[in-house]
């Protein structure tokens, strides 16, 4: 089994705008401390495609 080190996160900013960013677990902790909520996350993917 391989370790998952990085992943892609898709968030919903508004009804028309979304955002895609590359992350890893430590960076996600920082995102949540900065105000990201679970409700804003549309999906988490291991491939950008």
Image (spheres, rainbow, N blue to C red):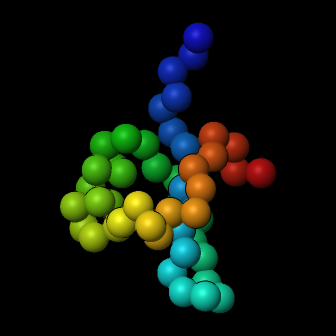
Left or right: where does residue 33 sit relative to residue 46?
A: left
Quadrant of the image containing the N terminus:
top right
Question: Front-most of 24 and 10?
Answer: 10
- Which of the 4 image quadrants contains residue 42? bottom right
Left or right: where does residue 2 sit relative to residue 33?
A: right
Q: Position of residue 14 (x, y in %)?
A: 54, 86
Q: Residue furthest left?
A: 33
Question: Front-most of 35 and 48?
Answer: 35
Q: Residue furthest right?
A: 49
Q: Position of residue 28 (x, y in %)?
A: 36, 51
Q: Residue furthest top?
A: 1
Q: Residue at x 55, y 75 (%)?
A: 12
Q: Residue at x 35, y 67 (%)?
A: 36
Q: Position of residue 32 (x, y in %)?
A: 29, 60
Count of numbered badges drawn on the protein: 0
Question: Front-most of 39 and 33?
Answer: 39
Q: Residue at x 65, y 88 (%)?
A: 16
Q: Position of residue 25 (x, y in %)?
A: 37, 41
- Which of the 4 image quadrants contains residue 39? bottom left
Establish if 42 lies above or below 14: above
Left or right: where does residue 48 sit relative to residue 24?
A: right
């Amino acid at each position: 089994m391989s370790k998952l080190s990085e992943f892609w996160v898709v968030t919903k900013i508004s009804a028309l705008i979304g955002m895609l960013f590359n992350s890893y677990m430590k960076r996600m902790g920082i995102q949540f401390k900065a105000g990201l909520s679970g409700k804003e996350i549309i999906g988490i993917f291991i491939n950008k495609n």
